[in-house]
Amino acid sequence: MCKNCQKSFSWKIISNKLLREKIWFFKWITEGYSVRQLEQQSTYRHRKLRQIINYWLLQPPRGLDKDISLCKHLLFDGTYIFKRVGLSLLMEATSFTTIHGCYGISENSRPQVLQFLQELKDHGLAPISVTTDGNPHVIASFRELWPNIIVQRCVVHIQRQGLMWCRRYPKRTDAKNLRHLFLRVTNIQNQLQKNLFIKDVHAWERKYGEWIELDESQGYVFSDLKRARSMLLKALPYMFYYLDDPNIPISTNAVEGYFSRLKNHYRQHRGLAQHKRSAYFLWYLNLCPR
């Protein structure tokens, strides 16, 4: 109360009000609730909830606010979110927590991947290994910034792509034998199985591979068989680093699972304006690190 005018006043701490409202924004991000669902759970009306969401979307979190120098084993993958606009994500392999991600970066663009990784290197990232799906632009970018890094190829991607190219019920004998090799890729658990697998691949190559390379036949089936052979031979030297170091993950399944959850939540807000999407994904990566 003012002693002069005898009127009473009250002070409101705006930060407390914002924090109370932020709870509903968190639910909108982490639970994927629509504004209509939030309206049923809270005392706010539709318009007020929209104001809360837009307020926090205009204030996205900082991209890197933690120490990443201790992150030594990584997982990297990308996915398409809207048409050809992608999201690239780097994950720590032992705890399966996100290190950094960025919307609008395509893993097929080497300059964009380089810029993305250079920012992480400037913040102290010095990895020992990275597991990736085999994208040549991603591998070249990692090796350019960290020449001694171990690049582990995701064996699930190798198996999935190889089986697709060989077809489910191949009629050719060489394709049948190659398909059996791809079926064994994810079941190699020790050095003995690794050596036996490599021996069988070389045996298949001596029997069929040289003839396939010289054959100039056309057609989808034969072209896919050549692709499967080429992919396996190129990936073979980089498939089994996980046997020497248990901290190196065998596949990028953890990132694929994260993308699945992210897209499931994003579909609830698929009408989100284009200029707000980058902030949405930054908030999601910040609030849902696993």
Image: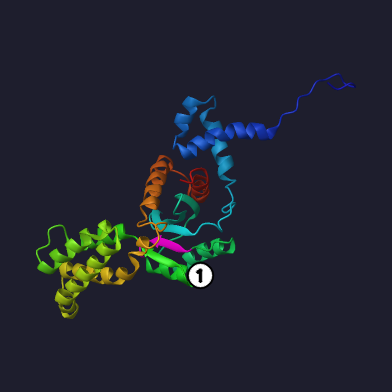
Which quarter of the picture shows residue 185? bottom left
Above or below, comparing residue 232 to residue 265 in the picture: below
Q: Position of residue 68 (x, y in %)?
A: 55, 56
- Estimate the x, y position of residue 285 in percent, counting from the top left: 49, 48
Q: Position of residue 209 (x, y in %)?
A: 18, 75
Q: Is residue 123 magenta?
A: no
Residue at position x 48%, y 40% in the image: 29
Instruction: Please state, as top left, top right, bottom left or bottom right, where the N terminus lies in the image.
Output: top right
The residue singled out by tag 1 in the image is 145
Instruction: Determine whether the residue tagged by mark 1 lies in a helix, strand or loop.
Output: helix
Identity, as a three-letter code, of the amino acid under mark 1: Leu
Q: Is 132 contained in the magenta span?
A: yes
Which is more toward the observer, 229 or 219?
Answer: 229
Q: Confirm whether residue 109 shows in the render.
A: no
Q: Quadrant of the C terminus?
A: top left
Q: The magenta stretch spans which residues? A: 128-134
